[in-house]
Image: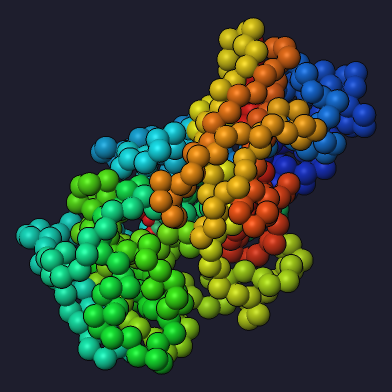
Amino acid sequence: MLRHGKTERSIQELYRDDPERADAVAFGRRGALKGTALAAMGAAVGGTIPFAGSMPEGTLPALLARPAAAQGASGPQVLRMEGKAPLVLLQERPLVAETPEHLLDEPVTSYANHFIRNNGQIPEVQTGDPRAWRITIDGEVNTPLTLTLGELESRFPVVTRQLQMECGGNGRAFFQPQTRGNQWGNGAISNAEWTGVRLRDVLQAAGVKPSAIFTGHFGADPHLSGATDRPSTARGMRIAKAMDEDTLIAFRMNGQPIPHIHGAPVRLITPGWPGSLSQKWLTRIWIRDRVHDGAGMGGTSYRIPQRPIVPGSNNNGADFVEMESMPVRSILSSHAHGTRLPAGTRSLDLRGAAWAGDLTVRAVHVSTDFGATWTEMQVAAPANRHAWQRWTGRVSLPSDGYYEIWYRATDSQGRMQPHVAANWNPQGYGANPISRAAILVG
Ligand SMILES: Nc1nc2c(c(=O)[nH]1)N[C@H]1C(S)=C(S)[C@@H](COP(=O)(O)O)O[C@H]1N2
Ligand SMILES: [Mo]
């Protein structure tokens, strides 16, 4: 915290409201960043800055500028829930918790480290046989179906896949100006192993009519207000994505029945598209002859501008488009942001993951000198389509001091994570800027 006038505000808050002022308060006038300004910055980050010469002017060191949620368990509030790691609690009601990047070090995301996102209340835990749970497929189909979980499992081929699920708002905290919604860092992502049946097979059994263009999803979670006639969320997708062989009606996560908080006993998994399309506690799929108009559809909900709009401006989203495949992103999982390493450490073995919605990741690069030079990492192939890709690599450090690990991925179409969050939109979707983790040596 930093004294500023009569009230104490965090440098993050000040930076958000008035970045130039924050920069001046923190470091004095930067100019060429030498002499006292450089010394002040070094004092603020706890070490000399070997690559200060290539630091972009007007940028706060990552140690001070990264969103609270990205700073792991030192952040404001920690989730306390049985079997769960100390995730960062972003909201209690509805319950929302982010996984700090360094806890995403497992190739397959465990229950303990899986993020949580709810829009409504958490439904009551079901008693009795989960195989009796029913889902309905209706609307633009020849034969509406009501199937129990037991029937789903016995009638259709059962598949197991590692699938990324990422909240549409992942990275929201990187937007300037701030947008409404949970201030996610990069941790609203998982790559669990899901077992279920293909939605496509079930839709084919029902017989999709030519008039079908969209799905509409419903779950058993009550609206946050408790109103029983309002679904907490009811999103939908283009039929083509519903017909993708990786879009599953899932009933096992990592070989076990799906834990309650993650949608027991049955949920959708729609990998690579906004996580909101992975309906938990699934009860019904309504096949529509128009773009679905349920809760969380239309306007600025999960919709993004086709042409950039003025950041911070009002817009009703009328000419926005649905957010579909998520943009390329990388995480660093080997070192927590803010890690201090022993004096004399001269190289770092780095690890992380990267993914790009329906696409794959072509490359991951890391810079330790504020982007002046970049080192290419090794990127493994995905375990299967729509799984994330793990990356590893080594960087060397010339001396003790304050470093930032900058990491960025490039997708299979050559699109790279941008330097700052781009295509600002009112509800903050799709922010995927290059990430910066602070590391102190000595
Ligand atoms: N029924 C229901 N399904 C839901 C939600 C919800 O609030 N209710 N939230 C969605 C959102 S926004 C996301 S990002 C994912 C999160 O899944 P998780 O809590 O298992 O991580 O679930 C989706 N499915
Ligand atoms: Mo989400």
**Residue beneath the point at 82% across and 42% down:** 20
**Residue beneath the point at 67% across and 54% down:** 415
Q: Front-most of 348 and 225?
A: 348
Residue 24 vs residue 76: left or right?
right
Q: Is residue 266 above or below residue 239?
A: above
Residue 205 on image: x %, y %: 24, 80
Q: Front-most of 277 and 300?
A: 277
Residue 326 on image: x %, y %: 54, 59
In this view, which residue lies farthest toward the top?
A: 344
Residue 13 vs residue 192: left or right?
right
The quarter holding residue 106 reads top left
Residue 56 on image: x %, y %: 82, 36
Q: Front-most of 206 and 264?
A: 206
Quarter of the rendered structure image containing ligand 1: bottom left
In this view, which residue lies farthest toward the right?
A: 31
Residue 404 on image: x %, y %: 68, 28
The quarter holding residue 295 reads bottom left
